[in-house]
Amino acid sequence: MNKKLGFTAMLLSATGMGFVGTFGRLSTPLKPDGTRFIIGDFLAFGRMTVGALGFLLLIVAVKKLAKLRSTKLSFAVVAGGLSIGASLALYVSSTLMTTIANAVFLIYTGPLVSAILARIFLKEKISVRNGVFLTLVFLGMLMTIGLVTYTSGEGLSFGLQLGADPEYPKKVLGDLFGLGSGVFYGLALFFYRYRGDIDSEIRGFWNFVFGAVGALIVMAFRITWLDPTNPFEVMKPTNWFWAVGMFLFCGLFAIGFLVVAGKHLPAVELSTVSYWECVVALLLGLVLWDESMTLVGAIGGVLILGGGLAPILLDLTGARSKAGSES
């Protein structure tokens, strides 16, 4: 393992991931009323397709094409890909309707969903420590989507306003999409626990193939029941320019460096550095899109990120201490 290369690759990958919301907005034209069309599912499909092509080229380069043909698929492989595709489709659409901060906070509720599923189906015990952190993530989610709010003179209030905001007319729907992206992200993390026997390149290829299918399924539901927008009818050349940029930078570039990082970093360190995506997304929302957060929303985001990151850091610190004592 070359950890210096691994950390550099993961930082580059997480940076590319953090640009998803910004590229998504630049790729999406505005309606006459100033709101954006909901085409995040199409953009997710493009990103997944480019990712699949990138992994196919990688498989050819490392001479594993025969192994790709011989590898048997399973429900977990298919479901994991469908889940990550649906998650990204909802996430990109979420960034078009609510703040980038809310969207990125809510997708990181995924580990909470994954932990609950592992407890139910894999009978994994949740320690008191991890239970506390998962509770923090849950409380942070309630605060981020506006179920817990604070107003001067009235104090804390609880309700189903879902963060209504005149600056974002579709914020309610955007927050729900963000929460949905977290649920599907959690499902993907859960299904990734299975079939560890498959090589990372092969798993990555099928992950993005079925991810593209998952994004198309979300798009079919969106067109049928929510918004019939056809991206080919509304996207202008400038939008296509940014969309291609998203497919390459947030897709092939970010995913390619993720593969490199995965070969040179342990899973714990990989997960830790991945949270750089949140920092990038928040900074872009602040600088490029002039987004602001309520105090309660900011605290909710801190709880989500802290609850997800703290156990990883503690495990990493513990592993290093153990290694030091053994040496």
Image (tube, helix red, strand yellow):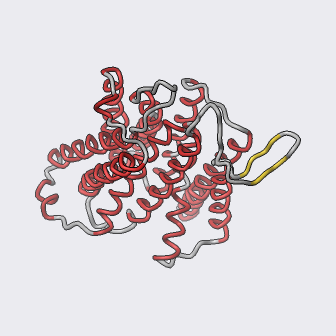
* Left or right of residue 321: residue 155: right
* Left or right of residue 287: residue 12: left
**Tag count:** 0
Q: Find residue 72 and report its horizontal and vertical position in percent.
A: 19, 67
Q: Find residue 271 and report its horizontal and vertical position in percent.
A: 49, 52
Residue at the limit of the structure toward the top, as seen here = 238
Residue for point 58% across, 24% down: 287
Which of the pair 175/35 is nearer the observer? 35
Residue for point 43% across, 46% down: 226
Residue 40's image quarter? top left
Tell me: residue 135, above or below residue 50.
below
Q: Find residue 223 and report its horizontal and vertical position in percent.
A: 36, 45
Residue for point 52% across, 63% down: 113
Residue at the limit of the structure toward the right, as seen here = 153
Q: Find residue 155 and report its horizontal and vertical position in percent.
A: 85, 46
Residue at the limit of the structure toward the left, as seen here = 66
Residue for point 57% across, 60% down: 315
Tell me: residue 218, above or below residue 233.
below
Which of the pair 166/258 is nearer the observer? 166
* Left or right of residue 210: residue 59: left
* Left or right of residue 290: residue 251: left
Residue 206's image quarter? bottom left
Tell me: residue 78, above or below residue 85.
below
